[in-house]
Image (cartoon, helix red, strand yellow):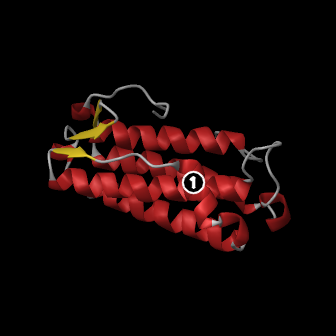
């Protein structure tokens, strides 16, 4: 089971616009943070046995695509038994480390911009819909809020992080 990056949320207190705005604000900070990282620096492990910046951003691409699927599918059904994903294997198999850093970075930005767009136009009436993950019942509202927390968690691990 993966950790939660946010606290449970009341779906009635969240609007698609507010969540999308939060994602866009985090993405703007990420863009400023990552723009100055060179390809050479992006390819270096952050610590012995850890991912590089490039692989971490690749993991965030995986996270974005998985959460986009959750957003879409949970608007189509009230309850969904949908697996998590094996993040280490996904990063290893996709070989983000062999792609040019500018392409990985551009894909990260483009996918997250699209995700923010999809969130902004989501049906908030579906925010109470449930994703069943390993015996847990997670609302779509929680999944979306937690995604932003997860994104911020990983950005804090990367060089040049500033919250403001």
Residue 131 in the image: above or below residue 9: below
* Location of residue 34 (image quadrant): bottom right
Q: Nearer the viewer, residue 67 or 23?
A: 67
In this picture, is 160 found above or below 99?
above
Q: Is residue 163 above or below residue 28?
A: above
- For the point 32% across and 49% down, which residue is it? 17
Kind of element beneath mark 1: helix
Residue 51: x %, y % from top left: 72, 50
Q: Quadrant of residue 136?
A: top left
Q: Is residue 109 above or below residue 87?
A: below
> Label 1, on which residue?
89
Residue 26: image location, x then y, percent: 54, 48
Residue furthest to the top in view is 7
Residue at horizontal 83 percent and vertical 59 percent from the top: 41
Q: Position of residue 60 (x, y in %)?
A: 55, 53
- Can the viewer see residue 149 in this picture? yes
- Name which residue lies at 85% across and 64% down: 40
Are there few (<14), some (14-19), or many (20+) residues within 10 Å of tag 1?
Answer: few
Left or right relative to 155: residue 72:
left
């Amino acid at each position: 089971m993966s950790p939660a990056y946010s606290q449970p949320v009341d779906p009635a207190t969240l609007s698609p616009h507010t969540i999308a705005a939060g994602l866009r604000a985090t993405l703007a900070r990420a863009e400023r943070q990552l723009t100055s990282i060179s390809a050479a620096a992006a390819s270096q492990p952050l610590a012995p046995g850890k991912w590089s910046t490039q692989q971490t951003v690749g993991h965030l691409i995986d996270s974005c695509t998985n959460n986009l699927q959750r957003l879409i599918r949970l608007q189509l059904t009230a309850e969904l038994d949908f697996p998590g994903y094996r993040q280490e294997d996904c990063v290893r198999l996709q070989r983000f480390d062999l792609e040019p850093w500018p392409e990985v970075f551009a894909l990260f930005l483009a996918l997250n911009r699209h995700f923010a767009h999809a969130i902004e136009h989501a049906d908030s009436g579906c925010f109470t819909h449930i994703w069943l993950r390993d015996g847990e019942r997670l609302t779509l509202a929680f999944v979306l809020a937690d995604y932003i927390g997860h994104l911020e968690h990983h950005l804090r691990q990367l060089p040049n992080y500033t919250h403001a």
